[in-house]
Amino acid sequence: DTGVSQDPRHKITKRGQNVTFRCDPISEHNRLYWYRQTLGQGPEFLTYFQNEAQLEKSRLLSDRFSAERPKGSFSTLEIQRTEQGDSAMYLCASSFNPGVSKDEQYFGPGTRLTVT
Amino acid sequence: EDQVTQSPEALRLQEGESSSLNCSYTVSGLRGLFWYRQDPGKGPEFLFTLYSAGEEKEKERLKATLTKKESFLHITAPKPEDSATYLCAVRRYTGTASKLTFGTGTRLQVTL
């Protein structure tokens, strides 16, 4: 078990460019989550998948953001026409959900996005 | 709307000086309170999940407790390597939703 991995770890882009991040969850985990964290704040929920189905999206997720998990394994988060306010740490987490009560989410190292 | 408030915002302890961090929450239908540790520039590291009032869990120098309104993370005889930000989060299960709502964290510094 190698844990949740994210790529790239750091991304610097110019305003208006598109960026895409990848997350590989723990292999047997069926749920995958995306969060965003800014300096001095806790992570904020963006969206989550159960297998390949996207089950919930936050109001924070504007139409410039899109996430996919095409085969129920890795996921990508794309931000189109980036803005300076998109600068943040983007965190991916995964969990194995055998039932309602157990859903412990394990986080990856994050992708630090800087929009100049 | 779910709310999580952590206090203090920052805490400085000397090595061996025990203390507690507080997490107050408001959530309709709690389905788990989570504690994470986060080092600078890294993702949160899972510590504990508590599901019902009165529940306690321990790991090395850390002990987490839960009441109907708040949770405490007790740190006994801390060491410098315990320095980190400690995050509290709640989960309210509604249908398919399982997101975590986080507090802003307590930054702990342990000095020699």
Image (cartoon, coloured by chain):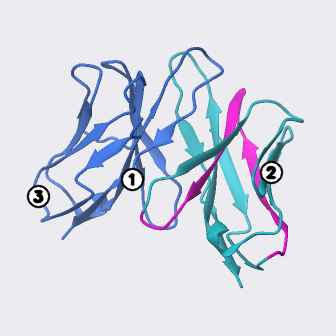
Chain colours: A blue, B cyan
Task: Name the chain letter of the residue that bears numbered label 1.
Answer: A
Considering the numbered disc 3 on the image, is that residue within a helix, a strand or a loop?
loop
Secondary structure mostly taken by the magenta-highlighted segment of the chain: strand
Considering the numbered disc 2 on the image, is that residue within a helix, a strand or a loop?
strand
Instruction: Give the residue type that dot 2 points to.
Output: Lys
Tell me which residue sits at (83%, 63%) in the image: B76
Q: Quadrant of the N terminus of chain B?
A: top right
Instruction: Give the residue type that dot 1 points to.
Output: Pro
On screen, residue B96 versus residue B10, left or right, reads left
Q: Residues within 10 Å of mark 3 (few under 14, many from 20)?
A: some
On screen, residue B39 versus residue A113, left or right, reads right
Tell me which residue sits at (59%, 59%) in the image: B104
Q: Nearer the viewer, residue B104 or A32?
A: A32
Q: Which mark is residue B63?
A: 2
Q: Which mark is residue B4?
A: none
- Which quadrant of the structure image shows residue B81? bottom right
> Magenta segment range?
B16-41
Image position, residue B64 (x, y; %): 79, 48
Q: Nearer the viewer, mark 1 or mark 3?
A: 1
Q: Is residue B28 magenta?
A: yes
Considering the numbered disc 1 on the image, is that residue within a helix, a strand or a loop?
loop
Give the residue at mark 1.
A109
| Same-chain status of marks 1 and 3 | yes
Residue with the most extreme right position: B54
Q: Is residue A7 above or below residue A68?
A: below
Image position, residue A86 (x, y; %): 29, 57
Image position, residue A95 (x, y; %): 48, 29
